[in-house]
Amino acid sequence: MLVPCLSKRWKDPTIAFPAEGRAVCPPGNTLFLNQRIFWYFAEDVHGIALAPSALYRPSDQIWTTNDEFTYLLNETKEVFYRGPSHYICYAGTFQCAYTGELPSVDFKRLPAAIKEELIRTSFSRPEMAGVPGERGRLRKLYTDGERKVAFLALQCVGFNQKLYDALLAARPPQLREVEQGSTGSAAKRRRQEETNTGRAAKMMKCGDRSETEASGDELMI
């Protein structure tokens, strides 16, 4: 697990990029998936990003197609996600390989945090997620297979070490404390930093895992 590099309060990580980070990662080159990603064991797929196939408007109960992943196909992005304690982590450089729909049986197997994030982002406007009874209604629609989840297959193609180093150097004090608490001794932290590039290489071969994970035998994409 890479150490957190950005504060949990950012909805768009690029807002917090230092100048050195923007120099090696221009605007538009990032993909922030919040808690809608898990790591995957497969030869050519290393991450699966998820999104509602359609967006819901409670006021008139209308569903509209969500084309969030359509414009990402064949793009290469620097991927960020929410890691431990909801701080933002950098995962590496990924190519957006292909899209599809998750079988309804697989929704039930997803970690609870991913399910809740999918339900929250199913609303056409985030503030609508607080409408009484609507979250439970949507949860049942997904569980019963009446509503679908789109997926985007991600293939790790590298690790932007310069970007990662720039983000670590600009971290606020509370993130340094998170790192010290989660990674232990200075020697252990040093070993972790030295293996970032190796981590990406291993992921390109067989995948990597985190707290949001699944194996090729568990999901049927």
Image (spheres, rainbow, N blue to C red):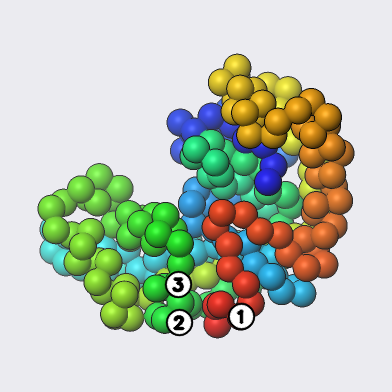
Residue type, numbered disc 2: Pro
Amino acid at circle 3: Arg
Q: Determine which residue is flagged by label 1.
A: 217
Q: Which type of secondary structure does the marked residue at label 2 adopt? A: loop
Vertical position of residue 11 compared to residue 128: above or below:
above
State how far apart marks 2 and 3 are (Cα).
Answer: 11 Å
Q: Residues within 10 Å of mark 2 (few under 14, many from 20)?
A: some
Residue 103 tag number: 2
Disc with the residue nearer the chain's start (2 vs 3): 2
Q: Helix, strand, or loop for circle 1? A: loop
Q: Which residue is identified by label 3? A: 109
At x 53%, y 29%, the residue is 7
- Disc 1 + disc 2, Cβ < 8 Å: no
- Whichever of labels 3 and 1 marks the residue nearer the N terminus, that label is 3
Give the camera-side residue of 42 and 151.
42
Q: Name the secondary structure under disc 3.
A: loop
Left or right placement of residue 124 versus residue 172 in this view: left
Residue 75 in view of the camera? no
In this rendering, the answer to whether 12 lies above or below 114 is above
